[in-house]
Amino acid sequence: MFKLFSLSWKIKIINKIKNHLGVLPITFVNKSDYDKITSKYLASTEGLSSIAPGKPLYLTFKSIESGKSFKIEAKHTMSDDQIDWFKAGSALNLIASQQQKL
């Protein structure tokens, strides 16, 4: 499952807004990891299909130049409801799908 993720650690209100839009706001466990990433890396996620409150995610960054990769631990603060919104693509998508079932 491919989803857009956001790397934001400065403004928490942005994270709340993004949750409703189906975007996964995450932060790196080690802030120094932010300095390792440039535009010349591709990112992939581990643990996204089994995302749960309090459970970490892992991002692997692979250099498009050298092919070398490294893994970073990330965390999120999403609740079960917010995870359902994320999986549906947004809160509105989830509500619409629930209405169709009625």
Image (cartoon, rainbow, N blue to C red):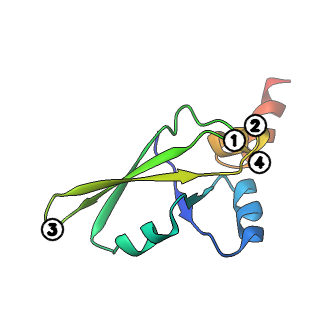
Where residue 99 appears, as percent x and y from the top left, is 84, 33
Q: What amino acid type should be assigned to the residue bearing mark 4?
A: Ala
- Compare marks 3 and 1 and give the one earlier in the sequence: 3
Residue at 61 percent of width and 39 percent of height: 55
Q: Residue 83 carries which label?
A: 1
Compared with 12, 19 (above or below) is: above
Report the residue marked by disc 3.
65
Q: Do the residues labelled 1 and 2 touch (CB within 8 Å)?
A: yes
Where disc 3 sits, the SS reads loop
Q: Which mark is residue 80?
A: 2
- Distance from disc 2 to disc 4, alpha carbons, whole Å, reads 12 Å
Mark 4 Cα-neighbour bin, 10 Å: few <14, some 14–19, many ≥20? some
Mark 4 vs mark 1, foreground winner is 1
- Distance from disc 4 to disc 3, alpha carbons, whole Å, reads 38 Å
Q: What amino acid type should be assigned to the residue bearing mark 3?
A: Glu
Residue at 65 percent of width and 35 percent of height: 52
Residue 37 in sight here: no
Where residue 7 appears, as percent x and y from the top left, is 54, 65
Mark 1 Cα-neighbour bin, 10 Å: few <14, some 14–19, many ≥20? many
Query: Is residue 80 left or right of 58 when viewed as pictured?
Result: right
Residue at 70 percent of width and 49 percent of height: 90
Compared with 98, 75 (above or below) is: below
